[in-house]
Amino acid sequence: MPTPKSADAKKPDDCLIVIFGASGDLTKRKLVPALHYLWKNGQAPEKFAILGVSRSKYTDKAYRDEAYDFADKEYESRADFDDFASRLYYEAADSTKSEGWPAIKERICEIQKKHELGANVLFYLSMAPQFFEPIIVQIGSQGMVTEGRKFCTIDTHEPPWQRIVVEKPFGSDPKSAVHLNNVLAQVFDEDEIYRIDHYLGKELVQNLMVLRFANSMFEPIWNHRYVDHVQITASESVGVEGRGSYYDGPAGGSLRDMVQSHLLQVASIVAMEPPITLDASDVRTEKIKVFKALRVPEPEDVPNIAVRGQYGDGSVNHREVTAYREEEGVDPNSQTDTFAAVKFHVDTWRWGNTPFYLRSGKAMAQKKTEIVVYLKPTPHKLFREQARQFRPNQILISVQPNPGIRLRFEGKVPGTGMSIKDVVMDFDYEDQWKVEPPDGYAILLYDCLRGDQTNYKHRDEIESSWDACQPILDYWAENPQDDLPNYNAGTWGPSAADVMMAKDGRYWRND
């Protein structure tokens, strides 16, 4: 299946891409294949190179071999990869300490001269969050981002840029998120900081703005008058799978790992007002308004609006899953949530008292990511008897699997009488466009290389999302739950999540 081409003809500037944490899975599994995709599809800079930096010992050749073996299915052939990998280099150094930087700087100069790249540099932090701050500090103290005072000669007629991409988790609470933002601001301007969230690179998430603002059949009903509620689900069928020690740490748990970051970002696009233009500043302005309008719960609200869960033993797709507390590195009495469901409110004129239900969990019945907009019933129940079996009309945006948009409404069954049944109108993304969507990282790296921050988080979005989630985390920390684990692997989570919805006269979409 062919891959889509970008309608934007602007070519990214020539640059060097420096990836810290290059020996990690993310770099080899996602970042290198994403950059290969851009190169293969003519969307990479005319001249570019990649320098991986990590403490593990590799030669350039050994690193290229490792990168290929780790994700060989992403490449057409070894020859195809080798052509791309002639731009891929590796430096074994500790980038968190000043002692490691003379070798890093020397290698950067060497590669820039070899490939005639100029002084544009994209730094990518692809490692554990505890290393973010020391590396950012070193980038600043080593003179990597100082106007005209760099270790290599620059062209004063076209001032170079230095950008930084920061992976999640971005802080573990409001205080740490603010601190990390302040550390970044001491070295980089805000328009050079790219806080990445791979969910914002998913095609159907990006398609949300087109669905809303390019279609007059949807925008007039996209408000509290017609929308009963919104559900956003990101469920995984796998457990923590060997990542127990990380997941049980300060940045783990479904509320921190998924709801606070990915799902609230998706919700902001569902809830935002139309931006004046598609410029990054205008889009982010409207998203920030949503985050600032999130209702911050009081402690007494938490039991009614939030549910946590933790999976026990079970089976998913005929595969046995070990209980979370039995994973290596997990506290046998852990209170970490592997499932979280929260009812949020966006206190704006558009959304009134319309709830947004967000949930995410591991070891659940299905792997899926979807947004479901439930519409209110018609004011006059003309088909009163049949309506007792009706389900609400729905606008379903399926992000994965089977990306597409589906409308669920009522239709008459052929024949005599007035028999009514729900029907589905289906827009299958891949079948319609006859393309295979690129990975979200490819889309986001392309944006970053062109200097487009539209699909990256502003610091205000991050800080406001933490403000809305921290009261829930505080309440859970102060009130340990005795019944954990409280759902079996392979189910749709704890029954308390269904009870929370039932109290509102609603139900989760588990189809």
Image: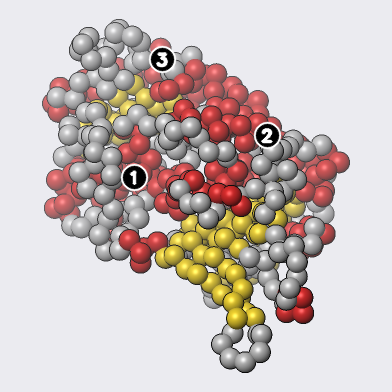
Does the image show residue 355? Answer: yes
Of badges 1 and 3, nearer the viewer stands 1
Does the image show residue 63? Answer: no
| Kind of residue sitting beneath label 3 | Gly
| Kind of residue sitting beneath label 1 | Ala
Kind of element beneath mark 3:
helix
Residue 170: percent from left, percent from top: 55, 33
Q: Residue at x 39, y 18 (%)?
A: 139
Crowd class of label 2 (few under 14; some 14 to 19; many from 20; radius 10 Å): some
Residue that mark 2 sits on: 293
* Marks 2 and 3, the one that precedes in the sequence: 3
- 464 in relation to 399, above or below: above
Q: Quadrant of residue 473?
A: top right
Whole-angstrom CA distance, mark 1 to mark 3, is: 27 Å
Residue that mark 3 sits on: 140
Of badges 2 and 3, nearer the viewer stands 2
Of badges 1 and 2, nearer the viewer stands 2
Residue that mark 1 sits on: 442
